[in-house]
Amino acid sequence: MLKNLLMFDLKFWKKVSRKLKSFMLGIATVTLCTVILASCTKAEAPLRVGANVWPGYETLYLARSLGYYDNTPIRLVDYPSGTEEVRAYRNGEIEAAGISIDQALVLAATNPDVKIVVVMDFSNGGDVILGKPEIPSLQGLKSRPVGVESTALGAFIITRALEQKGMSPKDIKIVSLGVSEHERAFKDGKVDAVVTFGSARTKLLAVGAKQLFDSSQIPGEIVDVLIVRDDVINKQPKALQALVDGRFRALDYLTKNPKDAAIRIAPRTGVTPEQFLESLKGLSSPNLEENQKLLGKTDPSLLNGVKRLSQVMLENKLLPKAVNPALLLDDKLVKKVKY
């Protein structure tokens, strides 16, 4: 009987031992998988890139449409305006953004990690002031309500436009409007003029709005750029380089295949392919070689233009403090572009 009891105990503990080993092996396996999964998740963290609807940024979306970003952790994030992009950048919700140069300066005044890595475009008529058909000129806006987006760019355009006519924003009634409200407010008569761009510009011109001013009258002063956080250049170099490579590849595609590119882009912008191609006439997009010269400062025109812009913004209290533009320009990525 004792022998049988001992045999039972031995079998019992062997069984317990096997279960314990199996349990421990299970824990080890789960732990290992968790570690591996965490490592993979960290490695695949997306490069989040903010942009709003503007012809100069559409090459990013064209690159995605053409598959240039496939198998690359790049996520394009839509925002209704540059104001929301600036807020998202400050809150750490995006690592990169397509924004206007004035917004880049405003960000850089409080976020020293801002780097300009691509010059997306120069506005050469794309930003406009549109008025009711009966308003003859900018002088005719005196004491009238004018819709202006509550951004440094909106304030800058209206200020520079009125300056040329010996006026100031105090001579008009500024009505703060988000870009999505421009078309409706103008058509409903809530404003007699609006500082606008993109699809709103195209649609309002189509219904008879009169162009009173455009950005070609202040050449080189309104620039759209791609900014990134300085540490992202080191933390996510492959995704960031793929983003920039794909963008220039898409710009080349747009140049060589404008009709197909427009068909791909137009649905997102809310205009027809023909209207999109027409909107491109209001801007100039520097190619890769031009970008290398502008960001590398061998062509000083961008640097000098940003210095002038910074001074104007300081004088009109659109910039909280002076920013050194030379520290913003970074040509590391454009120097390595391959496509």
Image: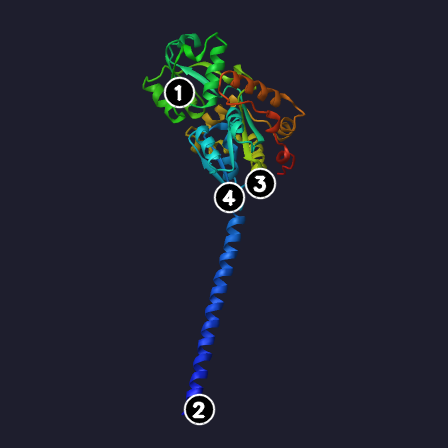
Q: Are marks 3 and 4 in contact (CB under 8 Å)?
A: no
Instruction: Spot the residue most to the bottom.
Output: 1
- The amino acid type found where label 2 is placed reads Lys
Write down the residue under mark 2.
Answer: 3
Instruction: Name the mark on residue 242.
Output: 3
Q: Are marks 1 and 3 in contact (CB under 8 Å)?
A: no
Q: Gap in Å between the C-alphas at discs 4 and 2?
A: 66 Å
Marked residue nearer the N-terminal end (3 or 2): 2
Write down the residue under mark 1.
Answer: 204
Residue 141 place in picture, x, y as percent: 40, 10
- The amino acid type found where label 3 is placed reads Ala
Q: Gap in Å between the C-alphas at discs 3 and 2?
A: 74 Å
- The amino acid type found where label 1 is placed reads Leu
Say which of 307 and 287 sits in front: 307
- The amino acid type found where label 4 is placed reads Pro
Q: Nearer the viewer, mark 4 or mark 2?
A: 2
Write down the residue under mark 4.
Answer: 46
Q: Gap in Å between the C-alphas at discs 1 and 2?
A: 100 Å
Say which of 229 and 219 sits in front: 229
